[in-house]
Image (tube, grey):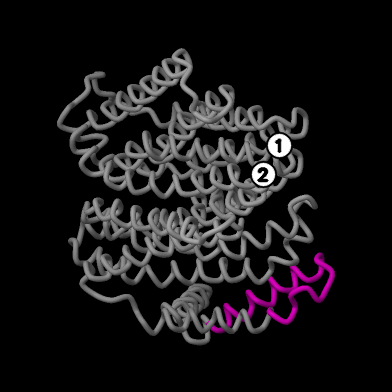
Amino acid sequence: MTVLLPFIVNAGLNFVLGLLVALFLGPEAFGLYAIGAATIVLINTALLDWLKLSVVRFYSLQSRESDPGIRATLDLLFAGVSLSLCALLAAALLAGIDAGLPAALLMVSVAGGIAAGWFDYHAAIARARFLDAAYARLVLVRSVAALLLMVGGAWWFHDPVIVLLGGVVSAVTAVLAIRGRLADAKPASGVLRIDLMRNFARYALPLVAGNAVYAAIPLLNRAILAESHGFAEAGYFSLASDIGLRLFPVLASMLEIVLLREVIRLDETRGRVAAQKRIARNMVPVLACVLPVALGFWLILPAFERLFVPASFRGHFAAHMALLLPGFAAIALFQAALAPVFLLAKRTLVAILASLIGLAINLAVIFAQPGTLAPMTVSIAQSAAYLAALLVMAVIALRALPVRPPLRDLACILAAGAAMGLAIWPLRGTLPAGLELPLQVGLGGLIYAAVILGWDVGRWRTGLKLRWLARRAARR
């Protein structure tokens, strides 16, 4: 529970953060902020994320003792990449190169990419060493600090650069708060080991290349909208996109941190086949969590928009979000259900293929239609890109597994989602938002849970019954 709490709190704070920043900045300034935020994600993903992935795969409690050079090499690589990035930025600014962004926004975006990478790197170290309390503190400090600094900056200055700077400070503060806990007891000498660097690059860079393309798609789409319709229209799109890209990856990470630990343990103790069979079974809880969140969010959109979305964004937000939700669900399903197949086998080149197919489809949908680009077409294109990438990865992953996921359980989950939708669809737009939203969430959740437990999906009802009987016997 210690490791899950920060994910739950972080998801809630991300909702509040995005909505409040949009409220205080307004559509046009928020559009500029969103382009800077997407640039931060792209920099982190393309240049620093491979070190986080290398921590997840190569750094553990066992390797920390047996080969301390792993941590030393990772630390040196992070410092080297960060300093090189700063040097490139300084050279570009001195040369007068036009990056299409204001210089201040570009500088804070680069700083934000490095700070986000530093945060993710240390979060991966905490997870690899099962330091759940330190990990929880890291995430919670950053979330609270970001809420205070970024929202405060938007309210006081109405400047997207100040808002992004608040994000940089919050990430650095969170890492400094727990960095001492993550230091190795026997640090190796600060010598870069080329053999380890090659292993890290061979494993992680193909996956990072794919992830960088995924991260580039929202940035590209925001830039296209800003160019064709102005920053205000980009802001409308970006609010829906930002909330989804914060919520669903957090949900996927929460599932991943719970499920991937057992997969890695099985791979080390009982062999690759046992771990692959567990991955196939894990697709049931992943779908059982992602489906009701995506479908439920779509069903409550009218009430959610009336209750929480700033007035200047209403109408645009719901229209974009309804079209973006399938793509967000695809991201979560890939990250939590399919990615472990390729991480375990170290077959990460396939991620590049899937991401390039997604990017091609995104561009084809946007530019295939003649005439003026409709803003909603960009949302359709982004969802189509992520769904296409998910389909490619699913075909390859399922062929690599020795068993299929439990089809009966997957069908029952889909039926539970349909039952939930039929129950709360008639409530859309019929009641005051403050009454409609909790009624939809409560009624939909009860019906979904009743169907899941009634059909004993994943044998969860049986497990609950056995646990209840065990506790009852222990009291006697």
Observer able to see residue 226: yes
Please tell me the numbered disc located at residue 17: 2
Which residue lies at the image location 40% right of the left edge and 53% below the top edge? 359
Which residue lies at the image location 52% right of the left edge and 81% below the top edge? 453
Q: Check if residue 430 falls in the magenta segment.
A: yes
- Residue lying furthest front: 371
Residue 414 percent location from the top left of the image: 49, 80
Q: Check if residue 1 falls in the magenta segment.
A: no
**Looking at the image, is 49 positioned above or below residue 97?**
below
Name the N-terminal-most of marks 2 and 1.
2
Question: What segment is highlighted magenta in the picture?
Answer: 425-451
Q: Quadrant of residue 266?
A: bottom left
**Looking at the image, is 462 positioned above or below residue 268?**
below
Residue 110 percent location from the top left of the image: 48, 27
Label 2 to label 1: alpha-carbon separation: 7 Å
Q: Nearer the viewer, residue 439 or 244?
A: 244
Residue 181 percent location from the top left of the image: 44, 31
Q: Nearer the viewer, residue 335 or 438?
A: 335
Which residue lies at the image location 56% right of the left edge and 39% below the top edge? 35
Circles 2 and 1 in contact, beta carbons < 8 Å: yes
The residue to which callout 1 is attached is: 151
Neighbour tally class for label 2: few under 14, some 14-19, many 20 plus, Cα within 10 Å: many
